Image (cartoon, rainbow, N blue to C red):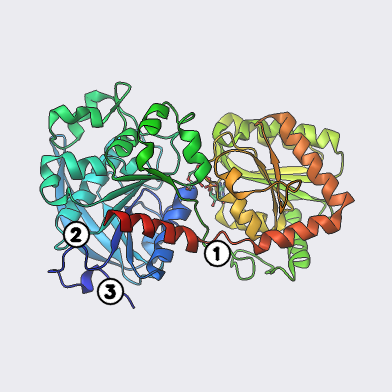
Amino acid sequence: MKPHFFDLNYGVTRGDFMEILHVAAECFPVAKAGGLGDVVGALPKYQNRLGVIAKVVIPMYRTSFLYQEEWELVHEGGQYLQEQFFKYSIIREKSNKLGFDLYLVDINGLLDREKVYGYSDDTERFIAFQLAVCDWIFHWQHLPTIVHCHDHHCGLIPFFLTQTNQFRSRLQGIPTVFTVHNAQYQGAFDWSKHTLLPPYDSWKWNLLDWHGQINPLAAAVKSAWRVTTVSYSYLDELTVHAGGLEKLFEYEKGKCVGILNGIDTEIWDPSCDPYLLFHYNKATMAEGKRKNKEEVCKEFGMDPSLPLFSFIGRLVGEKAADLLPVAIQDALLHNPGRANYIVLGSGQKEIEYQLQELRNIAGGFYNCSIGYQEALSHSLYAASDFLLMPSRVEPCGLNQLYALRFGTMPLVRRVGGLIDTVIDIGDTGGYGICFNEASVWDITYSIRRAINLYYENPEKYKGHCAQMMELDFSWDKAAANYLNLYTQLK
Ligand code: ADP
Ligand code: GLC
């Protein structure tokens, strides 16, 4: 049993043991909007197993996890956001049930909302969160070995620790790692709001600036000791496609490293997943998947004898979800009565509308569920034969890794982490279907390849599914890679 913060002798200094504090906006199962939550909810657990102390701090939202668990108050403090003083408290989940110490920052009226993002004052909310985290660390009697920040919501922390009068005296020596999960989201805001930030040496303004705005993602890339991306190929892509930050990534590439995400194989395990009606493993895959498909098809009014294609994800341009209505319509036309299609997702209203309308002309071969449903997502990974991921941008992608684990063949565009994790069945050792363009043509062509394989070469198809279930994308390797990186900074 490892000690946690409160068991430790407060006199110890940094360096006696390795203690990592992950700071993020999401952490599964407390608060999840996408893959960031999955990563922050799993990586620290696997790191702890390697003999270090990894902890997580996120905002205290009003999610069901908050009300179901027991918490203890560990710190109270206050900060200024402009001239507005706010109080904050840090609470800790008592049972350590997630496999790491989880801390929540409560700021009355700012953070305690139902959703993670999407409010008009998100800039103020996340600056206040970051101030509270820095102030809390400032009051630790020992200091963490590493502060590991994830995405732009925590992107100002490396700057706050090193450049602000308030924090740098005690905290500037703490190495910071910043992980870019998605550079499309940068959290940029106007310089007129710069008074939200604590005082800093004014000549350091350029550490915050990108193209005339305060840009937390750019600030993190400039100020953090090391920057990581969630796959190798995404790191390469960022110098040519980074939502305007390409030159910055090119300039800073010496401190950037790609570390491929893993998955939590204990949560995503078809042999014991509590969300599944029928459990299965590699040996019982055919029967297990068939039974799960029968259940899902019953729910969606479909014929379970047909192959099932699913899409699970945010309905946004990044995921090429705008192409789905036409691509599915084309696939239905060109492969009549040969496959079913289900979409689970939420996002842009016009895409949601088109996907709902498509039901009217799909003759029972297509259906969709608009919304976020964790349970249904697990059932779909298990029930589907194929998973569609035509993403325009995919820094890593976890869906294809879950699909592989569940024996479901991914159809992916060759981009970002999808390049690093899926090999086409036409190539040596391949187990998925890959295509080059985020276009209706490439999606429908790949669907045709999948349907042909399924009907014309069922043994080969089943062989690939068994092969996929044997692949190891667990966090063990990635957790060790992060530790190597931390050790270089310690
Ligand atoms: P991103 O983080 O860009 O959305 P990822 O592939 O990394 O993409 O992770 C997406 C995560 O969110 C996966 O766990 C996926 O199952 C889940 N997910 C996405 N949309 C939904 C939804 N509508 N309902 C349930 N789970 C979803
Ligand atoms: C982001 C990316 C996704 C990645 C996830 C976890 O949301 O869009 O590709 O898998 O973060 O790192």
Q: What amino acid type is highlighted by mark number 3?
A: Pro
- Give SS at disc 1: loop
* Label 2, residues with CA under 10 Å away: few <14, some 14-19, many ≥20: many
- Regarding residue 364, the answer to whether it shows in the image is no
Quarter of the image with the N terminus is bottom left
Cα separation, mark 3 vs mark 2, equals: 15 Å
Q: Earlier in the sequence, mark 2 or mark 1?
A: 2
Q: Are marks 3 and 1 in contact (CB under 8 Å)?
A: no
Residue under label 3, please give it: 3
Q: Earlier in the sequence, mark 3 or mark 2?
A: 3
- Give SS at disc 2: loop
Residue under label 2, please give it: 143
Q: Earlier in the sequence, mark 3 or mark 1?
A: 3
Residue at 45%, 52% (x, y): give it.
37
In the image, 174 versus 217, the foreground residue is: 174
In the image, 206 versus 132, the foreground residue is: 206
Q: Are marks 2 and 1 in contact (CB under 8 Å)?
A: no
Cα separation, mark 2 vs mark 1, equals: 32 Å
Q: What amino acid type is highlighted by mark number 2?
A: Leu
Q: What amino acid type is highlighted by mark number 1?
A: Thr
Q: Is residue 368 above or below residue 89?
A: above
Mark on residue 250?
A: none
| Residue 119: percent from left, percent from top | 37, 36
- Regarding residue 275, the answer to whether it shows in the image is yes
Cα separation, mark 3 vs mark 1, equals: 25 Å
Q: Is ligand 2 within 8 Å of the beta carbon of the residue shown at mark 3?
A: no
Residue under label 1, please give it: 265
Residue at 48%, 28% (x, y): give it.
240
